[in-house]
């Protein structure tokens, strides 16, 4: 047992229907008296309600995916009157608040409305043209997070499932990411347990809170574990498929995950045991596949824009990015078989022969 | 689901046999160039080896149980030349470093040699005469912790078992302490898993590292979970038995724990499921009792200094301290039956009638 684990300071408040009171309390504890509220136009009303109890100095609604540097620059200018940032929205909104905090040092109170998880990490990202830069800085870690599952009720079921499976992929990859340690695996296991319990309930009853609460809680743990462990094989594959062939983010993750699990789990007994335990099934793969069936998750990469001919092209790209301590050595032939099975939507199997 | 959870910033390094390198790295990251080493005389040689790679300005070896204010005062005076504190030892040594940090703000690198867990919390304690004052202050939270299981090899088996069962009690009580939340319960479950795996190995092979590593890791998680959740029924009972009747700390915890588990678990299904899952047994109590049998743990309070007549006296004292959200209401009659069973060493049973 040899590891380094950094715990990050954050006050997490979880209270459905009470975001307003929790935001007010969080701002008060930070000593804030001039709040900058960051929320996209679609969330303007929501943000107004959630920040009704704090002294707002400025409201900023220019939010864009991947945080373009120009958007960040304008937000920083608007922040000059503020002493606390309150972000209300998904990953792009939290990301913009982080960009402001990165240069101003202002503390963030994050109020997430999706399962993206950015609020639980010290990772920032900015794009200039097509080029995305990311970094790690403790100044961008939100000092407080307010989780109010009632705010996620308007997230459509399909998007909830996609976002929830994305969180599940964070948990699975956190089991064997380059810096994965037992604490990450324990938190990721708890995240899987919560996501597996919550997602079917969200599908069955989209307007009910208990399922939403479980998924939101699971997504938080997923982000904490994944940020600590770093990207594993799964995220390296999806990054290439998304970036090089324009495949849709959520669907790609949903399709690829069982194949990576089938590939790695036999060589990662601790991960296998924890994932199976979290799902309450005999094997990790059985648990994931049962959940995917309930959620009617996407099945094959060929249904989502990957051409069969792209596989040979993708293999060396992915191979170059695979973390060197992946539980199983990844060969070109093994990776090609994995991608081929994912392309066809074949049953992923725990079989040494099929994958190496 | 409604909770507040505060994560505390700490760099945890876990590497058996590498304490020296890890301490040097920790001091370097804190920018320390004048280290004050705090270690009791018994640990002087150990401390010297562990701090061989850092620039030591002062070595301080006056350490005393419960951190008397006079001892703390002298340590603070000795700290005036230092910019980083390195503590090497058990709870009293860590506690003294915390007392220095409380008034000086100096960062602590803690190197624990027992399973006490103080290194993972922001709780400090000082005694003046017979009066102990405790408090919570983020300045006393060690900024870095170096866990080197090789340093615990000299801890005798009996003391290792007592200290390990004390950590186990932290985990169990963290399931229903006054501020217990799902994150605490997940960490406590992982702690139980590690302690249950490690303690029998320490007994079977006291000179082996794998068991020691598991127990040290479990004790860390136990402390994190317990500090967040706060004292539950178990610790309130043991506090009165120890403070009022002078019962020995470790034995009292070891005896009382199964009775509290039998009392609370039927009313705390999440805790019951997590504890049973961590032990890998059908019920939480079965897991604890199996472990206690393997460890030959103490069985009855009458063997450790409690007079039968003390039970009636203890009941109102304990009752006044019971957290109001204990999973099951605690009545005088129920508490008397619990204490009576623990006094006799009777089988603790999941039985409504016996305990309420």
Image (cartoon, coloured by chain):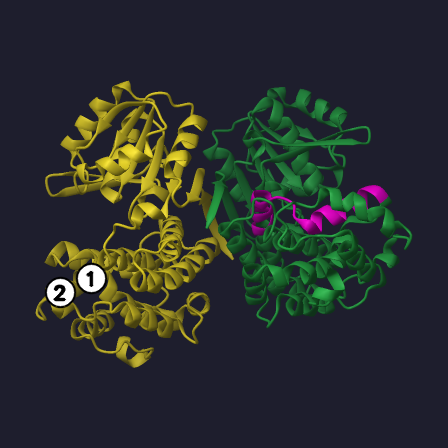
Chain colours: A yellow, B green
Q: Give the spatial CA distance, label 2 vs label 1.
A: 7 Å
Q: Can residue B153 be seen in this view?
A: no
Q: What element carries label 1?
A: helix
Crowdedness near tag 2: few (<14), some (14–19) or many (≥20) residues, C-alpha within 10 Å: some
Is-magenta flag for residue B233?
Answer: yes
- In the rendering, at what x and y percent does residue B214 appear? 58, 59
- In the rendering, at what x and y percent does residue A31 appear? 42, 23
Q: Give the range drawn in magenta.
A: B221-244
Q: Which mark is residue A304?
A: 2
- B243 horizontally vs A147: left or right: right
Residue at the (32%, 35%) spot, across then down: A50
Q: Residue A251 carries which label?
A: 1
Q: Residue B231 carries which label?
A: none
- A336 horizontally vs B137: left or right: left
Q: In which quarter of the image is the C terminus of chain A?
A: bottom left
Dominant SS type (magenta): helix
């Amino acid at each position: 047992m040899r590891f380094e684990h950094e715990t990050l300071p954050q006050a997490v408040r979880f209270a459905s229907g009470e975001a307003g009171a929790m935001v007010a309390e969080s701002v008060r504890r930070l000593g804030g008296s001039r709040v900058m509220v960051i929320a996209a136009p679609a969330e303007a009303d929501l943000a107004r309600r959630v920040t009704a109890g704090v002294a707002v100095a400025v409201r900023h609604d220019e939010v864009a995916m991947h945080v373009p540097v120009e958007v960040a620059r304008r937000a920083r200018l608007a922040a000059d009157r503020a002493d606390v940032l309150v972000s209300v929205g998904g990953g792009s909104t939290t990301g913009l608040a982080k960009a402001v905090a990165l240069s101003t040092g202002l503390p963030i109170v994050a109020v997430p409305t999706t399962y993206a998880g950015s609020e639980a990490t010290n990772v920032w990202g900015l794009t200039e043209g097509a080029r995305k830069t990311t970094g790690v800085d403790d100044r961008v870690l939100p000092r407080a997070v307010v989780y109010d599952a009632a705010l996620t009720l308007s997230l459509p079921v399909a998007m909830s499932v996609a976002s929830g499976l994305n969180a599940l992929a964070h948990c699975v990859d956190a089991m064997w990411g380059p810096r994965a340690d037992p604490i990450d695996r324990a938190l990721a296991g708890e995240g899987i347990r919560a996501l597996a319990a919550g997602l079917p309930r969200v599908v069955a009853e989209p307007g009910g809170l208990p399922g939403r609460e479980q998924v939101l809680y699971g997504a938080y743990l997923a982000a904490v574990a994944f940020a600590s462990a770093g990207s594993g094989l799964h995220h390296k594959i999806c990054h290439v498929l998304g970036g090089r062939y324009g495949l849709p983010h959520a669907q790609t993750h949903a399709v690829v995950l069982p194949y990576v699990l089938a590939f790695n789990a036999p060589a990662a007994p601790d991960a296998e045991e924890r994932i199976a335990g979290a799902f309450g099934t005999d094997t990790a793969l059985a648990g994931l596949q049962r959940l995917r069936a309930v959620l009617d998750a996407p099945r094959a990469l060929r249904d989502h824009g990957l051409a069969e001919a792209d596989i040979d092209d993708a293999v060396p790209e992915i191979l170059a990015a695979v973390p060197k301590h992946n539980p199983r050595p990844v060969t070109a032939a093994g990776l090609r078989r994995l991608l081929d099975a994912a392309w066809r939507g074949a049953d992923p199997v725990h079989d040494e022969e099929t994958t190496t």
